[in-house]
Amino acid sequence: MWFSKLIFIFKDKQLRNKILFVLFIFAIFRLIANIPIAGIDMENLKRFFAENQFFGLLNLFVGGALSNLSIIMLGLGPYITATIIMQLLTMIFPQLEKIYKEEGEAGKKRFNQYARISTVPLACIQSYGMLILLQRQGAISHFSFFELFNAIVTITAGSLFLMWLGELISEKGIGNGVSLLIFAGIVAQVPADIRQFALGWDFSHLPSYVFFFLMALLIIFAIVYITEARRNIPVSYAKRVRGNKMYGGVSTYLPINVNPAGVIPIIFALSILLFPSMVANFLASGADSFFTNFAKSLTQFLQNPWVHGSLFFILVFVFTFFYTMVTFDPKAISNNLQKMGGFVPGVRPGRSTAEFLHKILYRVLCIGAIFLGTVAVMPSIIQGITGVTTFSFLIGGTALLIVVSVVLDLWRQVKAQMEMREYEKF
């Protein structure tokens, strides 16, 4: 069955060209990810990223471009940040919300254009901050003003170029371009992990290796299951007569994802959890003995596995509820259902429906939040039990959630394209 579908994909010229175009963009992405900016001590830089958890995670998302101090070292971070900021601003400025939600496709294009424009200053600020931070951490040597200016312009241009590549994939390829480039950056580390695993092979650790990969399969299965899980709420539509035609009178479902927040809560939680450690590292290098001792104590406290794991789980749990409450509005859904003549059987339209959706959402979210928190801390638990440090993205965390979500979304879009081709034959 899978083999026949694969043959069908490569027999269809249009679908084949879209897939080949995506692979071509991936090749360009990997090429520019290995072009560093000038004046960098690569050995010192790679050692720094190997020892720093936060920067190691950022480096994973951009396919090693950050550890190379590549021209695309920021990846799609500035563009994603700009998009998130614009979405949050819709809650503050009603006019912006109107553009995004009420003006249809033209409004979304205008909204996306604002996000693209906002990417430029964000990329400049992030590149400057990253270079200064790496200098203070001793990962790179001090830049002169001209060298710093040149590096900021180069990195900003690289981020904009990567944003353009992502939009090219969305327009001429298949799938979401931004998600696919992040996916490519994560998967690009697999050959290096295989090499490291082969070099460090120890036959006496075979039971640990077997347990590690069995747990990886189990976790991947659980992520796929929860990602695809839905809570279907029945919705019926009243019959309406317009002219000589009758509309409505049908029953359908309103699906609510068990994990509607995706990977965003993990990213938020990780950023907040590691921020005190970054501040402590700055304070530790100061001349004041009080701040130096305080910073060292704070760093040791946060590096305790039990403290780190507990705080990480709690923050992911809280942010899952927070982000979903921001993006999912039961009142708006209730109003839309009422306008279209829809209702939940046994529940009055309007406020009662909104309260019912809110109650269901909280119940579903509780499962999703516990799941996300467990996935977030799972790599530390499994690595502590088995001692296997390679292939860490296979046993949970942000990277695995992104990989699974992108693969499932891409497969759905390929299936939709295949079904469309089948319909065209009739």
Image (cartoon, rainbow, N blue to C red):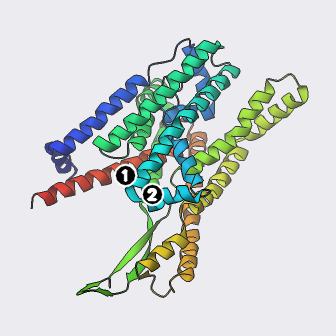
Residue at (39, 38) in percent of width and height: 166
| x, y percent for residue 120 | 53, 33
Marks 1,2: beta carbons within 8 A: yes
Numbered tag placed on residue 408 in the rendering: 1
Residue furthest to the left:
426
> Which residue does the numbered mark 2 point to in the structure image?
227
Q: Which quadrant of the view contains residue 366? A: bottom right
Residue at (44, 19) in percent of width and height: 35
Horizontal relation, residue 194 to residue 85: left or right: left
Which amino acid is tagged 1?
Leu
The answer to whether residue 374 of the structure is visible from this angle is no
Q: Quadrant of the C terminus?
A: bottom left
Which amino acid is tagged 2?
Thr
Q: How many other residues sit within 10 Å of disc 2, few (<14), some (14-19) or many (≥20)?
A: some
Horizontal relation, residue 324 to residue 108: left or right: right
**29 is higher (above) or lower (below) than 145:** below
| x, y percent for residue 259 | 50, 60
